[in-house]
Image (tube, grey):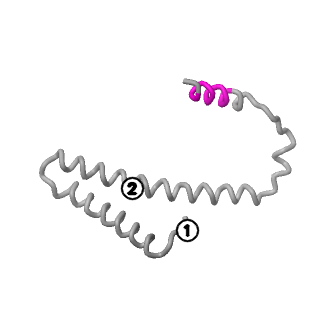
Amino acid sequence: MDLPGPIHDFLLVFLGSGLILGGLGVVLLTNPIYSAFSLGLVFCLSAAQLLIYVGAINVLIIFAVMFMNGSEYYNDFNLWTVGDGVTSVVCTSILLH
């Protein structure tokens, strides 16, 4: 994600302050309902950041697989396997549902 500097800084400060304030709200709020809402805020913000980092790691793994010598993997390469068939049936049924 190639964002300009000020937008990146704003998002970093916004998400970081949301995590800090949400964590403080979990600990310091005496009403359990408000504390649960604060925990939900922390979870949503951390899940968004976690998805970004997991996506970056997946891209790195894909690059590593692309740079490997894959000739020994294609000796027994079947174009259509049982898993492909099951996956296509499930995806088609979800799409048509």
Element assignment for label 2: helix
Residue 22 falls in image quadrant:
bottom left
Q: Earlier in the sequence, mark 2 or mark 1?
A: 1
Q: Residue at point 21% right, 57% down?
A: 25
Residue 58 falls in image quadrant:
bottom right
Question: Residue beneath label 1, please?
Answer: 2
Element assignment for label 1: loop
Please tell me whether residue 6 is drawn above or below residue 19 in the rendered image.
below
Q: Residue at point 84% right, 44% down?
A: 74
Q: Residue at point 85% right, 38% down?
A: 76
Label 2 vs label 1, nearer the camera = 1
Q: From the viewer's perspective, is 15 left or right of 22?
A: right
Q: Residue at point 74% right, 57% down?
A: 66
Question: For the residue marked with disc 2, what is the amino acid?
Answer: Ser
Question: Residue beneath label 2, please?
Answer: 46
Cα–Cα span, label 2 and label 1: 20 Å
What percent of the width, then of the height, locates residue 92?
Answer: 63, 27
Residue stretch rendered in magenta on the structure: 86-95
How many numbered dots are placed on residues in this image? Answer: 2
What percent of the width, then of the height, locates residue 80?
Answer: 78, 32
What percent of the width, then of the height, locates residue 51?
Answer: 48, 53
